[in-house]
Image (spheres, grey):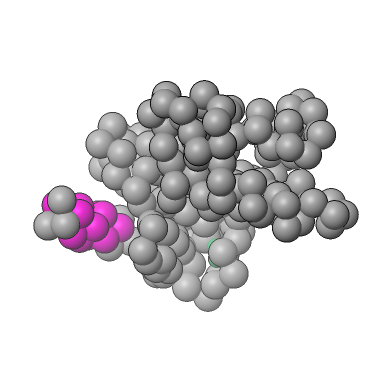
Amino acid sequence: MNLQDTGSQCACGCQSGFDFTELDLFIEKVKDMQGNLIVILQQAQNIYGYLPREVIAYISKRTGNTQAKIYGVATFYTQFRLQPIGKNLIMLCQGTACHVSGSQEIEAAICDELHIADGDTTEDGLFTLNNVACLGCCSLAPVMMIQNASWEETYGNLTKEKVLDILNQIREKEAKEA
Ligand code: FES
């Protein structure tokens, strides 16, 4: 992640505080590709972790798409985030198989433990919870996937106890690495 939200001047000479060098190279590479806006937004999200206002303004300037159009695309697709996320992104499946297997109880357990609701990030920035549609492993329902910068893991056959155990293991790991 290359987030430099310092308010200082960036490498491209603008005053946003974001370094647009990597994004710029990518935009250059796909500039003639039809329907390139989605891949540009995907790449921007890979670089910055989410789609900050300044980055959307920059993409608008570079591609000629209005900011309204870019926000329209970014809010239409659930894959895009307009807010920064925590270090560990919990994607809790709320698809049909998971729903009938108790995903709502799992959600309640996560929310109680972390004091957040769907879409929120914990105060310490360690976790973000997102309810998502089917993760494609329904036989393991209920399922969640946790993603962070260096790993990604899918956890199935969840119970409240199992989820709390997983969250605690991640907290311990993070504390050791801090
Ligand atoms: S419904 Fe949850 S993985 Fe398919």
Q: Residue at position x 56%, y 64% from top? A: 135
Residue at the left extreme, as displayed: 176
Q: In this view, does 157 lie to the left or right of 78?
A: left
Where is 69 relative to 170, above or below?
A: above
Q: Which residue is drawn at 66% across and 54% down?
A: 26
Ligand 1 position by quadrant: bottom right
Seen from the viewer's position, the closer of residues 98 and 171 is 171
Res 108 visible = no
Task: Specify the principal SS of the magenta part.
Answer: helix
Front residue (pair 56, 137): 56
Please tell me whether residue 119 is drawn above or below residue 160 in the rendered image: above
**Residue for point 49% across, 44% down:** 48
Residue range corresponding to the magenta coloring: 163-175
Question: How far across and how far down the image is residue 88, in percent?
Answer: 36, 51
**Any magenta on residue 63?**
no
Residue 114 at x, y = what percent? 28, 40
Where residue 55 appears, as percent x and y from the top left, is 59, 34
